[in-house]
Amino acid sequence: MRTEKLVAGRWIAAPLLWLLAGCGDTSSGGPLLPLGEYQNGLITFYDATGAGNCSFDASPGDLDVAAINIGQYQKSAMCGACAEVEGPLGTLRVRIVDSCPDCPDKGHLDLSRSAFAKIANPVDGRVPVRWRMVTCNTPGPIRYHFKDGSNPWWTAIQVRNHLVPVTKLEAWKNGAWVSLPRESYNYFVDAKGLGSGQVKLRVTALDGQTLEDTLPGVGDNKTFDGKAQFQAP
């Protein structure tokens, strides 16, 4: 959670680097494709580690991350999604890893200190920007992480490394697909568990794509690779 208060800033004119955004951004590898329209917003910064309300692991080697305002966090629906932020000093793709309860305004992103410094002057503190949702840089397949404490009678699963935002996770139970509720800490939870033996899952992306995987079983704090990755839109 974010608690700091930053000083008022000012806008500084900058080139419109978004003209090349369809091919990539100024710091992150991998293809960058838009998933929505630009919106006006505001950036501040905090001491990010890569961890946060999305329950991802800390990522000291990749701090191009952000917390999103509590309204657009949508009870963790934005976790793992990526945004292209156009600031006065450049353009940067960041990954959403946290919520920002002290960011009440729509469009407000709280970046890591290092990410903020790549696109704006830190002394300005609060900087008007525009940003849009884009694909992430995700080499390899999607991944499934079982929360610590998961067992056949209570199972919590997090979907990681997805190219586009994930909207739904289903499990095959008793001959039918059953949707698992998504908690605000970014785990899909079956309060009665998924039982022993193999676990068959289906993941749905924001644009309707689906991926199906069969995992060897429920694991306590274990991660399994899926077979494939979502396709770029």
Image: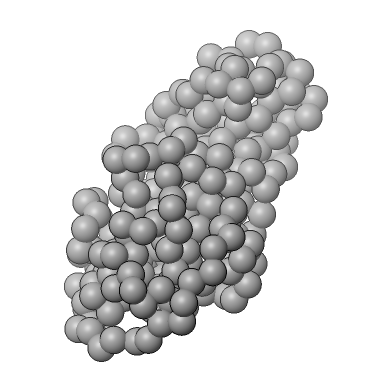
Nearest the camera: 125 or 132?
A: 125
Q: Position of residue 180 (x, y in %)?
A: 70, 38
Nearest the camera: 122 or 71?
A: 122
Q: Is residue 101 left or right of residue 97?
A: right
Q: Position of residue 23 (x, y in %)?
A: 20, 64
Question: Which residue occupies 56% across, 35% down?
Answer: 158
Q: Position of residue 190 (x, y in %)?
A: 73, 31
Q: Is residue 165 visible?
A: no
Residue 196, placed above or below residue 78: above
Residue 204, placed above or below residue 145: below
Nearest the camera: 172 or 181?
A: 181
State which quarter of the image contains the C terminus. Answer: bottom left
Question: In this view, which residue lies farthest toward the top?
Answer: 197
Question: Which residue occupies 24% across, 54% down?
Answer: 28
Q: Position of residue 6 (x, y in %)?
A: 48, 71
Q: Is residue 110 visible?
A: yes
Q: Quadrant of residue 43?
A: bottom left
Residue 62, placed above or below residue 143: below
Question: Which residue occupies 69% across, 44% down?
Answer: 183
Question: In this view, which residue lies farthest toward the right?
Answer: 192
Nearest the camera: 60 or 231?
A: 60
Q: How is the image coloured?
A: one colour
Question: Which residue occupies 36% across, 58% down?
Answer: 113
Q: Is residue 168 left or right of residue 63?
A: right
